Image (tube, helix red, strand yellow):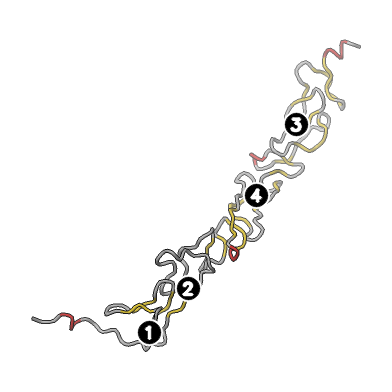
């Protein structure tokens, strides 16, 4: 009976000899886990993967055995060598400190922030690292911070509530823009509105 093992293709010698970083048998020559390269080509060798200390080395295949690309980055890190913060995160990957941007969707233009400072890209009239509050002169974060429109006669100032957009009304005055007298009040003026009981006193 013919020995079919004689038909198996022989892998040409690499000249590497025995190495703890090279896996070798009748069928395969390749780099051990945690190393990359191509020892089957002339001058090829296996070198250690560099994942900036941010890869899960307890798992097999944590880096590509041919290219060296890191495949299992930890701590919200990313990139070829796990050397940068993942999208929508910021901080210092080298110190294993990457935290979520947490950009407020109501006040920001993007979920991505500055990779170093974490500052989100705010809409006009919005401030804060996460774009979570309205600037002076703007209000109603739910609507993306609109310019305050406070009635100069009925409001105490032109600054409105940064969350609701409601203006700060004078006594007896109401309305988002402070443009009307409360029920039971009369005489809309620079002093506000007077109650009917005050009028009857005169």
Q: Which mark is residue 177?
A: 3
First in residue order: circle 1 vs circle 3: 1
The percent position of residue 81, horizontal first and vertical second, equals: 52, 69
Query: What distance separates the C-alpha of mark 2 from that of mark 4?
Result: 36 Å
Q: Residue at x 43, y 79 (%)?
A: 46
Distance between mark 2 and mark 3 Cα atoms: 63 Å
Q: Is residue 159 left or right of residue 17?
A: right
Q: Is residue 43 left or right of residue 181?
A: left
Q: Position of residue 169 (x, y in %)?
A: 79, 29
Taking the spot 42% from the left edge, 87% from the top edge, the residue there is 43
Mark 2 vs mark 4, foreground winner is 2
Tell me the residue that label 4 is attached to: 130
Answer left or right for 92 relative to 62: right
User: Is 137 located above or below residue 176 in the figure?
Assistant: below
Query: What residue did someone put label 1 on?
Result: 41
> As drawn, which residue projects farthest toward the bottom?
15
- Gap between marks 1 and 2 measured at Cα: 19 Å
Mark 4 and mark 2 in contact (Cβ < 8 Å)?
A: no
Q: Determine which residue is flagged by label 2.
A: 49
Q: Residues within 10 Å of mark 2 (few under 14, many from 20)?
A: many
Residue 52, how many percent across, how many down?
54, 69
């Amino acid at each position: 009976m013919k020995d079919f093992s004689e038909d198996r293709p022989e892998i040409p010698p690499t000249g590497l000899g025995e190495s703890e970083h090279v896996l070798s048998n009748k069928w395969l020559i390749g780099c051990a886990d945690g190393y990359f390269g191509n020892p089957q080509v002339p001058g090829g060798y296996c070198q250690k993967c560099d994942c900036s200390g941010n890869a899960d080395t307890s798992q097999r295949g944590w880096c590509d055995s041919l290219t060296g690309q890191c495949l299992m980055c930890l701590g919200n890190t990313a990139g070829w060598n796990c050397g940068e913060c993942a999208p929508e995160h910021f901080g210092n990957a080298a110190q294993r400190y990457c935290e979520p941007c947490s950009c407020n969707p109501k006040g920001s233009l993007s979920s991505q922030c500055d990779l170093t400072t974490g500052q989100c890209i705010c809409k006009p009239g919005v401030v804060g690292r996460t774009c979570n509050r309205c600037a002076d002169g703007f209000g109603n974060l739910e609507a993306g911070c609109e310019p305050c429109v406070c009635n100069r006669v009925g409001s105490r100032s032109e600054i409105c509530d940064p969350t609701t957009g409601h203006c700060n009304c004078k006594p007896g005055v109401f309305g988002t823009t402070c443009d009307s007298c409360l029920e039971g009040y009369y005489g809309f003026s620079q002093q506000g509105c007077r109650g009917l009981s005050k009028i009857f006193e005169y």
